[in-house]
Amino acid sequence: MTGWTWEYESYLPEQERVREALCTLGNGCFATRGALPECTADDVHYPGTYAAGCYDRLTSAVAGRRVENEDLVNLPNWLPLRYRLTGRPWLTPDTGTVLDHRQTLHLSSGLLERRTLYGIGQGRTLCVRQRRLVHMADPHLAALRTEFTAEGFTGGLEVQAALDGGVTNDGVPRYRDLDGRHLTHVHTGSAARNLVWLRCRTRTSDIRIALAARLTAGAPVAARHVFPRAVQRVRLRLPPGRTVTVDKTVALHSSRDPAISDPLRAAVDRVGDAPGFDELLRSHRTAWEQLWRRAELEVPGDAGRILRLHLFHVLQTLSPHTADLDVGVPARGLHGEAYRGHVFWDELFVLPYLDLHFPEVSRALLCYRHRRLERACASARALGRRGALYPWQSGSDGREETQELHLNPRSGRWLPDHSRLQHHVGSAIAYNVWQYCQASGDTEFLHTKGAEMMLQIARFWADSAAYDGRLRRYRIRGVVGPDEYHDAYPGARRPGIDDNAYTNVTAAWVLARALTVLRALPEPRRRELLERTELHDEELRQWEDVSRTLHVPFHDGLISQFDGYGDLAELDWDGYREQYGDIRRLDRILEAEGDTVNRYQASKQADVLMLGYLFSPRELRSLFVRLGYDLSEKAWRRTVDHYLCRTSHGSTLSGLVHGWVLARARRGEAWTFCQEALRGDIADVQGGTTEEGIHLGAMAGTLDLVQRGLPGLETRGEALWLDPVPLPELSSYTFALRYRGHWGVRLRLERGALEITVPSSDRCPVDVRLRDRTVCIQPGETSRLILTR
């Protein structure tokens, strides 16, 4: 790990899949895992290529039931390129004698390089060097350059390249009982002497996919077609000490792409017109240089190096190209098949970062939700409620994609899955709408699509709340909170718990914010919206009432995760850690024992503490005051302490949220949790999950920790509010952001001082508000402020 490279030394089969995930290359439209091109999918390797938003739905027989699942499709593999010396077997690190192996991910240029030195006997060696890119300027191109150097001998070399349409979705072992054959109607052909193509369709979504490949080797290229592969072969002569080069350039198109008529024709034309590898690399590097400038982040030490890797993967999954697509935020990036490529609430941890760098991408991701607003309203109607109920897991068309069964790998049993009761995903969408509009100043979006979503989400919460005369408060029953472990009361026949504190407080926030938005709308637009939604004054008065009287349960002077939480049993945490070691997935351990986590005060991840992640201390106190509760600093501190020692951290998001909350509370333990969040994927702390895809929300969240969490940065009231937190382990850092039309606003925090530079432009000054003063910074000016406590 250096400043701009991520390097692996030696070949270790047991680590290969994690490396493949972390060495994925992408451009926001498609991505390819960092698998070695000469290796096929097996227990060690898993090459995979995924296009944003390319889903397919299949039905499988599971546990005596027919289960329907929609998956992000593993597309035809464009990587295959194998080689052998004349008369010898094909060489791979698994079959040959590897003297040296090194794989380097160049973050600055989005380039993956590998170098393998094979021993072929009697002191002779063959060096294989490859450089790979998924083009960041042209989102439909990828290229692979392979260089062969013989030392100590002269010989013939056969190289075979292919496009492989025989792939399946097989990258997650616990899904292997499900049908993963998504591709059909595979056809191959040749378009020129050195150009072959492959086309196919997805089985039910009927998305047409086409790839075309050009092989350049300075020697005649022969093609043959062996179903389901298009194969190219070239024979080369290896003189001693001289390098022979083979370039493979690939174009990928689908019927979801704009401005094309036929994917096959588009792919063939694009790869035929593509320049050579060197020119492709130059334009690719330029595109990456521009991205790094827009997302400038300078943090010292190992933390800074890991943050740069996180930023690299965020940019590969959600680049400016994403703004042209109808896609959401895939929780595991475009890096693998975990969670079937679905869209969860992870955008809650991703969009706040993008808002201040790539607002056009945030807007597009929110438009994905708006296009599915009617489907969300239909889901609410199916429950007999008004408003919009967004799905916990979303895919192509916005229906609920959460599986009805999930496999516990520890017990081998298929169990009911009630996570679709996490209705708080709607609040996350409303929160992101508000945050985006505050950061970007996009009132057009707020007054149109944003207002429509916020109002319908608020309407769902108001209609879900039932008045309890005994409490003289409204209650929301039958939900699952962010914790996810507690999906029912002990012994209950029906799933769901009542008055989840996070759900109720965020619902109150949505209702209050929706009313604020409605009042601020221009009168003609307000009238249009009220007419279209048939919102009347009586309903709006109910929203106001519910937003002030939703029930938040307490026990022992602290916030209860849900009603009845304080009555649950305490878990023998030390005993379980001693017995099992890693208890992150405590739910699986207890189920395998015939027990259930529903019986205990135990959380998978932050639940109540998520409130401290979303809202500053000032805003959180004001929310509770609005609800009629006095949340003192002491009560919040006791709440933090209670859940801190009752959380198993079974999600990579958990360490992030705890680090954020503890940092804002100026607690010494903050850095421990921040490190946990930073290491989540590079150390595969969840034990085998990273190989199935990186955790995009946690990666983006660590970036946002530096951008908003530690500086205490808020965008509200047409100003930048800052309340920096001194964290000894991260005492100085620099980042740039894009704020309301100002490109490259630069902030540097170092040892009690804050320096802000606003680049020259014709924009209005930037108002910066600290605890004790307000500063107006003109474009072209730099202001250095001494921070006081």
Image (tube, grey):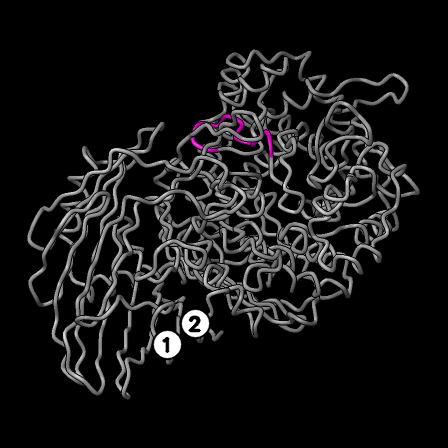
Residue assigned mark 2: 11
Which residues lie in the magenta part? Answer: 395-405
Check if mark 2's residue and mark 1's residue have beta carbons within 8 Å. Answer: yes
Q: Is residue 400 magenta?
A: yes
Instruction: Look at label 1 and name its amino acid.
Output: Val
Q: Badge 1, how many Cα within 10 Å: few under 14, some, many 20+?
A: some
- Residue 168 screen position, x and y as percent: 37, 42
Q: Secondary structure at mark 2?
A: loop
Left or right: where 752 falls relative to 564: left
Q: Secondary structure at mark 1?
A: strand
Q: Earlier in the sequence, mark 2 or mark 1?
A: 2
Left or right: where 78 falls relative to 787: left
- Residue 759 screen position, x and y as percent: 43, 61
Q: In this picture, is 285 found above or below 272?
A: below
Left or right: where 591 falls relative to 454: right
Mark linked to residue 98? 1
- Residue 222 screen position, x and y as percent: 9, 56
